[in-house]
Image (spheres, rainbow, N blue to C red):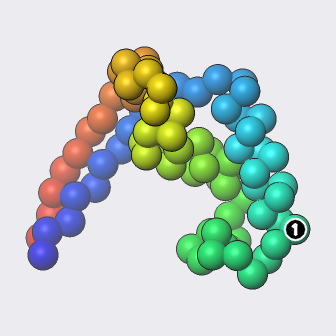
Amino acid sequence: MQTVETCFTLSYSQDQYEYAKEYVEDMKRHPRRVFWIGNKGKSDEELIISHIAHKILSGFYNHYDPSLSRKQILRMKSSTSK
């Protein structure tokens, strides 16, 4: 099995940041949700940025206009290892 490590440089709006911040605040009120698997011990800022990245890379922000991904995903660097 090979592993690929990829680093993205993303841009996001203040609205996206505020939405992610509200999402993290909501998740704090529900400590048993699946969201917390792998996220325990992370700071609020890490959780917010991770949520933004997940939504951008998953296309949730770009479903209405796929060309937006070209504006938000600024750079990608990948390397493989075995």
Amino acid found under the numbered disc labelled 1: Arg
Q: Is residue 78 above or below residue 74?
A: below
Whether residue 13 sits left or right of residue 65 in the image: it is: right
- Residue 48: where, in percent of width, then height? 68, 48
The picture places residue 58, in percent across and down from the top left corner, at 43, 46
Label 1 sits on residue = 29
Taking the view exactly as shown, the residue that stands out farthest to the bottom is: 32
Quarter of the image with the C terminus is bottom left
Picture quarter containing residue 14? top right
Instruction: Determine the residue positioned at 78% across, 63% down.
Output: 27
Using the rendered image of the protein, determine whether residue 10 is visible from the camera's viewpoint.
no
| Location of residue 71 with respect to 50 vertically, above or below | above
Check the image and report above or below for 64 versus 80.
above
Q: In the image, what residue occupies the spot 70% across and 34% down?
A: 17
Horizontal arrangement in the rendering, residue 79 relative to residue 33 (left or right): left
Residue drawn 44% across the image and 21% down it: 65
Q: Nearer the viewer, residue 52 or 67?
A: 67
Element assignment for label 1: loop
Residue 20, position as x, y percentages in the image? 71, 44
